[in-house]
Image (cartoon, rainbow, N blue to C red):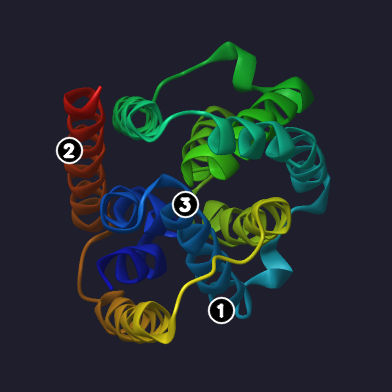
Amino acid sequence: MMGASVQWLTGMGFALIAVPALVLVLGPTEGVVLANCGAGAISVVGLAGGWRRVRPRAMVPLVLASACTVPAGTWVATRLPEPVLLAGMGALVTAAVLLVMRGAQVPALRGAKGALTAGAVGGFMNSSAGVGGPPVSLYAVNAGWTVREFVPNAQFYGVMVNAFSVATHGVPRLGGSVWAPAVAGMAVGAAMGKALAERIPEKTARLLLLSLALAGGLTTMAKGLWSL
C-alpha cells in the first residue's frame, strides 16, 4: 500500500519500498516477481494519463538495453543461495537509494551511452533484485529532466522492464491469500497517493520514499548477512 501510494506521488518507489518487505515474507524469488507484477501494474495505471509525454527517442535505448540484461539478472537470482540473494538485494537497494539521495552526477550516464548504461543496469537490477528504477532516475538527473518529464517516462520504462522480468521469471505461484491483499493494498495505496498528490510537497514525499527504502534495504541486507 505504501509503495503504491509513493509511486503515484513521485513516479517511482513502489519496488524500493515493497521489495525488502516482500523478500523477507515470501523469499527472494517469489518476492521479487510479485514486486515486478505490482510495479508493472502501477506503472500501467499511472501511464494512462501521461503517455503523450513519453520521449520515444530517449526511452528506446533504455528499454532495449534492459531487455538484453533482464535474462542475466533472472539467471543470477535463480542460482544464488537465499542468504546471498537477500544480502545482495539489500546492498543493491541501499546503494541505489544513497546514490539517488545524493543526486549523483555520473558522466557515464549522459547521452545515448548513458541511456544504454542506465537501461542495462536497470534491467539486471529489476530481474535480480526487483528494483530497476534508480539507474533511470540517475539518468534523468544527469539529463536535466524535470519531475514532470521524468514521471511518465519512468512509468513507461516500468511497464516494459517489469514485463520483461515477469516473462523471464514466470508469474509467481501464489495463492489467493497472497494475491488478494496484494491487489487490495495497491488499489488503496494508489487511491491514497492520488488524493495526497496535491497536498504533500514533492520534496516531502521523495524524502519519505527514500527513507523507507533505505531502511528496508538495510534490513534485508542485515538479514542476509546474519543468515550466512
Answer few, some or many: residues within 10 Å of disc 2's Cα (few below 14, many 20 plus, some between 14 and 19).
many
The residue positioned 38% from the left and 35% from the top of the image is 82
How far apart marks 1 and 3 lie (CA) works out to 20 Å
Provide the residue designation for mark 1: 45
**Contact check, label 3 and label 2, Cβ < 8 Å:** no
Q: How far apart are marks 3 and 2 (CA)?
A: 16 Å
**Are the residues flagged by discs 1 and 2 in contact, CB closer than 8 Å?**
no
- Please indicate, yes or no, whether residue 191 appears anywhere in the rendered image: yes
Which amino acid type is shown beneath numbered disc 3? Answer: Val
Crowd class of label 3 (few under 14; some 14 to 19; many from 20; radius 10 Å): many
Residue 74 vs residue 151, the one in the foreground: 74
Q: Which of marks 1 and 3 is in front?
A: 3
**Camera-side residue: 126 or 223?**
223
**Badge 3 is on which residue?**
32
Comes first in the chain, label 1 or label 2: 1
Q: Which residue is drawn at 69% across and 71% down?
A: 51
* The disc label shown at residue 213, or none: none
Secondary structure under tag 1 reads helix
Disc 1 from disc 2: Cα separation: 30 Å
x and y percentages locating residue 117 in the rendered image = 68, 24
Q: Earlier in the sequence, mark 3 or mark 2?
A: 3
Callout 2 secondary element: helix
Q: What residue type is labelled 1?
A: Val
Residue 48 placement (x, y as % from top left): 63, 79
Tally of marks: 3
Q: Residue at x 47, y 38 (%)?
A: 134
**Label 2, on which residue?**
219
The N terminus, quarter of image: bottom left
Residue 186, above or below 169 = below
Position of residue 175 measured from the top left corner of the image (x, y, whole percent) = 44, 80
